[in-house]
Protein backbone atom coordinates (compact mmCIF):
# COMPACT_ATOMS: atom_id res chain seq x y z
CA UNK A 1 0.00 0.00 0.00
CA UNK A 2 1.39 3.37 -1.00
CA UNK A 3 1.23 6.20 1.51
CA UNK A 4 1.12 9.89 0.75
CA UNK A 5 2.24 12.48 3.28
CA UNK A 6 0.35 15.76 3.60
CA UNK A 7 2.00 18.59 5.46
CA UNK A 8 0.57 21.61 7.25
CA UNK A 9 -2.92 20.19 7.51
CA UNK A 10 -5.20 21.13 10.42
CA UNK A 11 -8.62 20.35 8.89
CA UNK A 12 -9.90 17.42 6.80
CA UNK A 13 -12.95 18.09 4.62
CA UNK A 14 -14.75 14.99 3.34
CA UNK A 15 -17.16 14.32 0.51
CA UNK A 16 -19.50 11.38 1.24
CA UNK A 17 -20.63 9.42 -1.86
CA UNK A 18 -17.65 7.79 -3.56
CA UNK A 19 -15.38 8.87 -0.71
CA UNK A 20 -16.66 7.52 2.62
CA UNK A 21 -19.51 5.35 1.25
CA UNK A 22 -20.28 3.75 -2.15
CA UNK A 23 -21.33 6.19 -4.85
CA UNK A 24 -24.31 3.90 -5.61
CA UNK A 25 -25.87 4.25 -2.12
CA UNK A 26 -27.97 7.33 -2.89
CA UNK A 27 -29.22 6.28 -6.33
CA UNK A 28 -29.68 2.57 -5.62
CA UNK A 29 -30.82 2.60 -1.98
CA UNK A 30 -31.94 5.98 -0.65
CA UNK A 31 -34.03 7.23 -3.59
CA UNK A 32 -35.84 3.92 -4.23
CA UNK A 33 -36.52 3.66 -0.46
CA UNK A 34 -38.12 7.12 -0.39
CA UNK A 35 -40.23 6.35 -3.49
CA UNK A 36 -41.45 3.02 -2.13
CA UNK A 37 -42.38 4.57 1.21
CA UNK A 38 -44.04 7.77 -0.02
CA UNK A 39 -47.62 6.48 0.06
CA UNK A 40 -47.46 4.69 3.45
CA UNK A 41 -45.58 7.62 5.01
CA UNK A 42 -48.12 10.17 3.83
CA UNK A 43 -51.04 7.93 4.89
CA UNK A 44 -49.60 7.65 8.42
CA UNK A 45 -48.64 11.29 8.89
CA UNK A 46 -51.23 13.19 6.83
CA UNK A 47 -52.93 14.67 9.89
CA UNK A 48 -49.73 16.33 11.10
CA UNK A 49 -49.61 20.08 10.47
CA UNK A 50 -46.15 20.07 8.83
CA UNK A 51 -47.12 17.26 6.43
CA UNK A 52 -50.37 19.02 5.54
CA UNK A 53 -48.32 22.16 4.82
CA UNK A 54 -45.89 20.16 2.63
CA UNK A 55 -48.76 18.64 0.63
CA UNK A 56 -50.28 22.08 0.16
CA UNK A 57 -46.95 23.45 -1.06
CA UNK A 58 -46.71 20.59 -3.57
CA UNK A 59 -50.28 21.20 -4.78
CA UNK A 60 -49.43 24.85 -5.46
CA UNK A 61 -46.27 23.82 -7.35
CA UNK A 62 -48.35 21.39 -9.42
CA UNK A 63 -50.91 24.06 -10.32
CA UNK A 64 -48.07 26.30 -11.54
CA UNK A 65 -46.09 23.56 -13.29
CA UNK A 66 -45.88 24.25 -17.03
CA UNK A 67 -44.46 20.83 -18.00
CA UNK A 68 -46.88 19.05 -20.34
CA UNK A 69 -46.75 15.75 -18.46
CA UNK A 70 -47.44 17.52 -15.15
CA UNK A 71 -50.40 19.34 -16.74
CA UNK A 72 -51.83 16.09 -18.12
CA UNK A 73 -51.50 14.46 -14.69
CA UNK A 74 -53.30 17.41 -13.12
CA UNK A 75 -56.18 17.25 -15.61
CA UNK A 76 -56.47 13.51 -14.99
CA UNK A 77 -56.46 13.97 -11.21
CA UNK A 78 -59.18 16.65 -11.42
CA UNK A 79 -61.30 14.20 -13.43
CA UNK A 80 -60.91 11.65 -10.60
CA UNK A 81 -62.00 14.14 -7.95
CA UNK A 82 -63.06 11.41 -5.55
CA UNK A 83 -59.43 10.80 -4.52
CA UNK A 84 -58.31 12.00 -1.11
CA UNK A 85 -55.49 14.55 -0.50
CA UNK A 86 -52.70 11.96 -0.23
CA UNK A 87 -53.87 9.82 -3.18
CA UNK A 88 -54.22 12.96 -5.26
CA UNK A 89 -50.68 14.26 -4.77
CA UNK A 90 -48.88 10.92 -5.29
CA UNK A 91 -48.78 10.95 -9.12
CA UNK A 92 -47.17 14.40 -9.05
CA UNK A 93 -44.62 13.31 -6.44
CA UNK A 94 -43.70 10.29 -8.55
CA UNK A 95 -43.39 12.58 -11.58
CA UNK A 96 -41.00 14.88 -9.68
CA UNK A 97 -38.86 11.92 -8.63
CA UNK A 98 -38.85 10.50 -12.18
CA UNK A 99 -37.59 13.82 -13.56
CA UNK A 100 -35.12 14.19 -10.68
CA UNK A 101 -36.51 17.64 -9.89
CA UNK A 102 -34.87 18.80 -6.69
CA UNK A 103 -37.73 20.89 -5.30
CA UNK A 104 -37.56 21.74 -1.61
CA UNK A 105 -40.84 20.15 -0.39
CA UNK A 106 -39.89 16.86 -2.08
CA UNK A 107 -36.41 16.94 -0.54
CA UNK A 108 -37.96 17.65 2.87
CA UNK A 109 -40.34 14.74 2.48
CA UNK A 110 -37.58 12.34 1.37
CA UNK A 111 -35.52 13.42 4.40
CA UNK A 112 -38.38 12.61 6.77
CA UNK A 113 -38.92 9.19 5.16
CA UNK A 114 -35.19 8.36 5.43
CA UNK A 115 -35.09 9.47 9.08
CA UNK A 116 -37.88 7.00 9.83
CA UNK A 117 -36.16 4.25 7.80
CA UNK A 118 -32.85 4.69 9.67
CA UNK A 119 -34.60 4.77 13.06
CA UNK A 120 -36.42 1.53 12.16
CA UNK A 121 -33.14 -0.10 11.13
CA UNK A 122 -34.24 -0.47 7.50
CA UNK A 123 -31.49 1.90 6.34
CA UNK A 124 -27.86 1.78 7.46
CA UNK A 125 -25.08 4.18 6.39
CA UNK A 126 -22.65 1.87 4.49
CA UNK A 127 -19.26 3.40 5.35
CA UNK A 128 -16.12 1.81 3.92
CA UNK A 129 -14.36 -0.13 6.70
CA UNK A 130 -11.16 1.94 6.56
CA UNK A 131 -13.09 5.18 7.18
CA UNK A 132 -14.07 5.00 10.90
CA UNK A 133 -10.58 4.05 12.23
CA UNK A 134 -8.97 6.76 10.08
CA UNK A 135 -11.44 9.41 11.26
CA UNK A 136 -10.81 8.42 14.90
CA UNK A 137 -7.04 8.48 14.41
CA UNK A 138 -7.13 11.94 12.81
CA UNK A 139 -9.45 13.32 15.46
CA UNK A 140 -7.21 11.96 18.23
CA UNK A 141 -4.23 13.70 16.60
CA UNK A 142 -6.12 16.99 16.95
CA UNK A 143 -7.31 17.41 13.37
CA UNK A 144 -10.69 19.08 12.83
CA UNK A 145 -13.03 16.98 10.67
CA UNK A 146 -15.81 18.32 8.45
CA UNK A 147 -18.30 17.06 5.86
CA UNK A 148 -19.17 18.72 2.55
CA UNK A 149 -21.80 16.90 0.51
CA UNK A 150 -24.60 17.85 -1.87
CA UNK A 151 -27.08 15.89 0.27
CA UNK A 152 -28.73 18.02 2.97
CA UNK A 153 -26.97 18.35 6.33
CA UNK A 154 -29.83 16.33 7.88
CA UNK A 155 -29.25 13.51 5.35
CA UNK A 156 -25.46 13.61 5.96
CA UNK A 157 -25.95 13.32 9.71
CA UNK A 158 -28.31 10.35 9.31
CA UNK A 159 -25.64 8.41 7.38
CA UNK A 160 -23.11 8.94 10.20
CA UNK A 161 -25.63 8.53 13.05
CA UNK A 162 -26.91 5.18 11.76
CA UNK A 163 -23.68 3.95 10.17
CA UNK A 164 -22.56 0.31 9.97
CA UNK A 165 -19.93 1.36 12.57
CA UNK A 166 -22.33 3.04 15.01
CA UNK A 167 -23.01 6.70 15.68
CA UNK A 168 -19.97 8.67 14.43
CA UNK A 169 -21.43 12.18 14.38
CA UNK A 170 -19.24 13.18 17.33
CA UNK A 171 -16.14 12.98 15.13
CA UNK A 172 -17.22 15.95 13.00
CA UNK A 173 -17.05 19.61 13.99
CA UNK A 174 -18.62 21.07 10.83
CA UNK A 175 -21.24 20.03 8.27
CA UNK A 176 -21.64 21.84 4.93
CA UNK A 177 -24.17 21.31 2.15
CA UNK A 178 -25.09 23.27 -0.98
CA UNK A 179 -26.44 26.13 1.15
CA UNK A 180 -22.75 27.10 1.28
CA UNK A 181 -22.66 26.99 -2.52
CA UNK A 182 -22.05 24.52 -5.34
CA UNK A 183 -19.27 21.97 -4.83
CA UNK A 184 -18.01 22.89 -8.29
CA UNK A 185 -17.36 26.56 -7.43
CA UNK A 186 -14.05 27.71 -5.88
CA UNK A 187 -15.88 30.39 -3.83
CA UNK A 188 -17.67 27.66 -1.79
CA UNK A 189 -14.32 26.38 -0.49
CA UNK A 190 -13.25 29.89 0.56
CA UNK A 191 -16.51 30.23 2.49
CA UNK A 192 -15.83 26.88 4.20
CA UNK A 193 -12.29 27.95 5.19
CA UNK A 194 -13.72 31.17 6.56
CA UNK A 195 -16.43 29.32 8.50
CA UNK A 196 -13.82 26.99 10.02
CA UNK A 197 -11.47 29.89 10.77
CA UNK A 198 -8.43 28.45 8.98
CA UNK A 199 -6.31 29.12 5.91
CA UNK A 200 -7.45 27.24 2.76
CA UNK A 201 -3.97 25.62 2.59
CA UNK A 202 -4.55 24.00 6.00
CA UNK A 203 -7.51 22.00 4.65
CA UNK A 204 -7.17 18.60 2.98
CA UNK A 205 -10.25 17.94 0.82
CA UNK A 206 -11.03 14.32 -0.16
CA UNK A 207 -13.47 13.67 -3.01
CA UNK A 208 -14.06 11.33 -5.97
CA UNK A 209 -15.04 14.19 -8.29
CA UNK A 210 -12.43 15.82 -10.50
CA UNK A 211 -14.41 19.05 -10.87
CA UNK A 212 -14.86 19.34 -7.09
CA UNK A 213 -11.13 18.75 -6.57
CA UNK A 214 -10.34 21.34 -9.20
CA UNK A 215 -12.59 23.97 -7.57
CA UNK A 216 -11.10 23.25 -4.12
CA UNK A 217 -7.57 23.31 -5.49
CA UNK A 218 -8.21 26.68 -7.18
CA UNK A 219 -9.18 28.04 -3.75
CA UNK A 220 -5.85 26.89 -2.32
CA UNK A 221 -7.00 23.71 -0.54
CA UNK A 222 -4.82 20.61 -0.61
CA UNK A 223 -6.74 17.86 -2.41
CA UNK A 224 -6.74 14.08 -2.79
CA UNK A 225 -8.84 11.98 -5.16
CA UNK A 226 -10.72 9.01 -3.69
CA UNK A 227 -10.81 6.11 -6.16
CA UNK A 228 -12.78 3.32 -4.50
CA UNK A 229 -12.29 -0.15 -5.93
CA UNK A 230 -15.95 -1.09 -5.32
CA UNK A 231 -17.24 1.78 -7.41
CA UNK A 232 -17.34 1.65 -11.17
CA UNK A 233 -13.89 2.45 -12.46
CA UNK A 234 -13.79 5.99 -13.72
CA UNK A 235 -11.05 7.60 -15.68
CA UNK A 236 -8.18 8.14 -13.27
CA UNK A 237 -7.47 11.71 -12.32
CA UNK A 238 -4.24 12.80 -13.94
CA UNK A 239 -3.93 15.98 -11.91
CA UNK A 240 -4.32 14.95 -8.30
CA UNK A 241 -2.82 12.33 -5.97
CA UNK A 242 -5.15 9.35 -5.71
CA UNK A 243 -5.90 6.91 -2.89
CA UNK A 244 -8.02 3.73 -2.72
CA UNK A 245 -8.17 3.56 1.05
CA UNK A 246 -7.97 6.19 3.83
CA UNK A 247 -5.02 4.34 5.41
CA UNK A 248 -2.95 5.70 2.51
CA UNK A 249 -3.37 9.24 3.80
CA UNK A 250 -0.61 10.28 6.20
CA UNK A 251 -1.06 13.66 7.80
CA UNK A 252 1.59 15.91 9.24
CA UNK A 253 -0.04 18.52 11.41
CA UNK A 254 0.27 22.26 11.03
CA UNK A 255 2.09 23.79 13.98
MG1 LIG B 1 -18.64 12.16 -4.29
Image (tube, grey):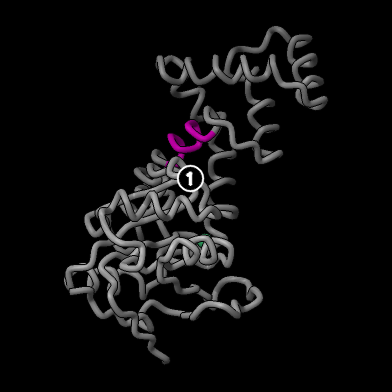
Q: Residue at x 25, y 68 (%)?
A: 10
* Residue stretch rendered in magenta on the structure: 107-114
Where is residue 178? Give x, y as percent: 47, 44
Question: Ligand 1 near label 1 (Cβ, under 8 Å)?
Answer: no
- Residue 147: horizontal and vertical position, in percent? 37, 56
Q: Residue at x 34, y 55 (%)?
A: 193
Q: Secondary structure at mark 1?
A: loop
Q: Residue furthest bottom?
A: 1
Q: Image point 49% across, 73% down: which residue?
A: 226
**Camera-nearest residue between 242 and 160:** 242
Is residue 105 visible to the viewer in this orientation of the structure? yes
In this figure, which residue is indicated by the disc labeled 1? 181
State the image coordinates of residue 78 (x, y, percent, origin top left): 75, 10
Q: In the rendered view, would you say 41 is above or below 138?
A: above
Q: Residues within 10 Å of mark 1 (few under 14, many from 20)?
A: some
Q: Is residue 192 magenta?
A: no
How many dots with numbers? Answer: 1
Amino acid sequence: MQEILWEGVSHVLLDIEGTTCPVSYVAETLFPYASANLAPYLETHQQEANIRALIQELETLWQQDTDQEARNLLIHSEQCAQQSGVGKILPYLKFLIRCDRKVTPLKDLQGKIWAEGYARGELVGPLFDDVPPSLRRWQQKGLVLAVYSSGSIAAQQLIYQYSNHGDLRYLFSYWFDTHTGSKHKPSSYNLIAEAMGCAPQAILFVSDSDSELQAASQSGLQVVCSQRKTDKVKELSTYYPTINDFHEILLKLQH
